[in-house]
Amino acid sequence: MGNIKSSLRSQDDHAGSSAVSRKIDKQIKADHKRMKKEVKLLLLGAGESGKSTVLKQMRLIHASGFKPSEREGFRVIVFLNVFQTMQTLIEAAQSFNLIDSSLEVEHTKLFTEAPSLDEHQRFPENFYIPLKTLWEHESIKETMKHAQTLALHDNIS
């Protein structure tokens, strides 16, 4: 009726396939063990609610930290955030009519266009004194009282 076709394997073929099978089984067990230790976390929240910050803090605490290229990227972001915040504060002070003649015009002119900051370039020194002077100026302090109505980062104050 029916014929079964089979081939006789040599002892070497059987031993070879057993070794491959054991190797696969060993890899499956190792993957399973690794997956038991792995934790997956889904961070949900509105924009600017701190999801990225939590993730970065977890990396600092539980991992090896950040690569130099990542730190360099953050440094540039911090500079641009400081610059854009001062730009926003100056514009808001003008719209609230809080700018007076004592606010140094040459300092506010620096914040009309964002400078480019190349990789590993120091913070431009021509911004140190103007930033400090403007931050301590009464017009900017008064504007900061209205910070909740402005689009500022939470960590500005």
Image (cartoon, rainbow, N blue to C red):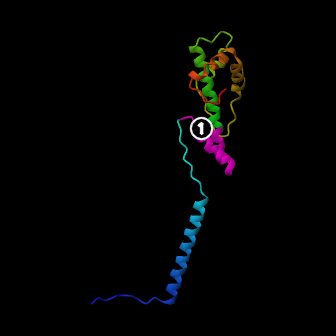
Residue 82: percent from the left, percent from the top? 64, 29
Residue at image position (60%, 16%) is: 93
Above/below status of 59 relative to 118: below
Q: At which x and y percent is residue 156?
A: 65, 28
Mark 1 Cα within 10 Å, few/some/many (few <14, many 20+)? some
- Indicate the position of residue 85 as horizontal and vertical percent values: 61, 26
Dominant secondary structure (helix, strand or loop) of the stretch shown in magenta: helix
Reply above or below: 139 against 42: above
Q: Does 157 sit left or right of 24 as displayed? A: right
Quadrant containing the N terminus in the rendered view: bottom left
In the image: residue 137, left or right of residue 85:
right
The answer to whether residue 106 shows anywhere in this view is no
Which residue is depicted at the point 69% across and 32% down?
Answer: 123
Tag 1: amino acid: Gly
User: What are the residue bounds of the magenta stretch?
Assistant: 47-74
Q: Is residue 58 magenta?
A: yes
Give the residue at the far front of this rendering. Answer: 36
Tell me if residue 107 is in the magenta stretch.
no
Give the residue number, with chain letter if any, for mark 1. 50
